[in-house]
Structures are given as C-alpha cells and as structure tokens.
Image (cartoon, grey):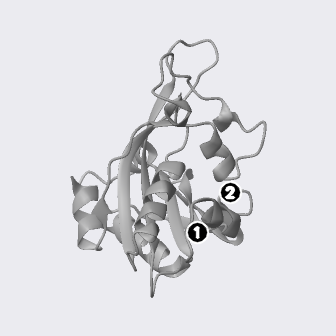
C-alpha cells in the first residue's frame, strides 16, 4: 500500500500484466544465451507460444505495455507494476516466486535522473538509508553507459537506467525510455518499521 501511495503521488499509473510470456521475449530484451533467466517454467497447456512460459523477469511485460502506449500515441507515460517472477530451482518442483517492482517511463523531461529521483523518493519514504548507486554495464536491456545498480544495507535491490536502443526497436518505442527493476522482498526487508 505504501509503495502504491508513493508511486501514485509521483504521477505513476499501476498496471497488472500476465505472468506468462513467450521465449521470444527473452530475445527482445537481449538476454544472452545461457543466462539462467532463460530457464523458465514451461506451461503444460499454453494458449499459444506468446504465453508458453512463466516469466523469470518482469521487464518484458513492462516494455510491452510501454510499446503499446507509444503505438497509441501517448506522449508521456509513467507506469509501475508489483508482480511476480518465477525462477526454477534445481531439485525443486516449484520455482522461487519473487515479488518485483518494475517502473517504466518515457516522455518529455524524463531521463535517467528523473527515474533515479523517483527511486530515491520511494526509498526515502520508506526510511531506507545507506543507498548506493553504481554504474552497471551488464544489464542486457539497458544502455551500457546509462545504467546503474541500486543497493542498500549491503544488498542489491535491482537495476535501473535507459533502455538499450535495440530493445526500444524490438518493442516499437520511438523515444528514449527508462526502466527500473527491483526485488520487492529485499526492499521490504530493509524498511524501517515506520
């Protein structure tokens, strides 16, 4: 609820997407071959190839919604989703279900620093201190010179930055877009019980 309040106060609209995606979505976000996030739980009776696996990252879902908004000529968009990712665990029947926060935005005046400011507001509102931001070059869907990893309390919370131009093209987004992907459970564990 607190997350929702902060995000709405920052001008973001909440979205809810399906937890099913297709294997091609991993190609669209430039996930390298051999990346463990390509090992998805396969749906035994899917509606189609586009919904045949459980997502291991929420990013393709967010980029899909940003792409549809851009195609519908929405000049500026600020969105967030609190949703699950499903990571298979060796030797276990059920996957590791992780709650994630994904934020996506584009439009005039939006840039790396507006997204960073939005994240700082979220963390500050929940009294999470000791936040560190470090440059990141290995997040496949983010521009290598405009990406960062966010951590606090010695734990990595996630990544954020400008979407890679090739990924923008894959989703039909003709403007610079920005995405943050955070582990909600780690974030929640750092909240100062206020």
Q: Nearer the viewer, residue 101 or 13?
A: 13
Q: Using the image, determine if residue 12 lies above or below residue 83.
A: below
Can you tell which mark lies on residue 139?
2
- Seen at 32% across and 48% down, the residue is 16
* The image quarter in which residue 13 lies: bottom left
Secondary element at tag 1: strand
The x, y position of residue 155, in whole percent, is 55, 50
Q: Residue at x 70, y 47 (%)?
A: 31
User: Residue reaching furthest bottom?
Assistant: 109
Name the spot of residue 181 as percent of width and height, x first: 50, 55
Distance, label 1 to label 2, CA atoms, is: 9 Å
Which quadrant, please, contains the C terminus?
bottom left
Q: Which residue is mark 1?
A: 161
- Mark 1 vs 2, N-terminal side: 2
Q: Residue at x 39, y 40 (%)?
A: 18
Query: Would residue 133 appear left or right of 99 to someone viewing this image?
Result: right
Q: Is residue 83 above or below residue 11?
A: above
> Cβ–Cβ below 8 Å for labels 1 and 2?
yes
Quick one: label 1, few (<14), some, or many (20+) residues within 10 Å?
Answer: many
């Amino acid at each position: 609820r607190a997350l929702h309040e902060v995000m709405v106060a920052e001008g973001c609209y909440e979205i809810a997407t399906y937890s099913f995606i297709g294997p091609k979505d991993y190609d669209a976000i430039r996930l390298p071959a051999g990346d463990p996030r390509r090992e998805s739980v396969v749906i035994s009776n899917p509606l189609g190839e586009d919904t045949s696996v459980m997502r291991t990252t929420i990013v393709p879902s967010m980029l899909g919604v940003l792409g549809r908004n851009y195609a519908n000529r929405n000049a500026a968009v600020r969105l967030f989703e609190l949703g699950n990712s499903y990571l298979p665990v060796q030797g276990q029947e059920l996957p590791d279900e992780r709650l994630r926060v994904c934020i996506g935005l584009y439009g005039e005046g939006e840039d790396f620093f507006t997204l960073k400011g939005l994240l700082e507001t979220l963390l500050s509102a929940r009294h999470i201190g000791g936040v560190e931001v470090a440059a990141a070059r290995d997040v496949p869907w983010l521009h290598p010179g405009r990406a960062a990893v966010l951590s606090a309390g010695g734990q990595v919370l996630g990544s954020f930055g400008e979407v890679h131009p090739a990924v923008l093209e894959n989703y039909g987004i003709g403007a610079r877009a920005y995405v943050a992907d955070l582990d909600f459970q780690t974030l929640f564990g750092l909240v100062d019980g206020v």
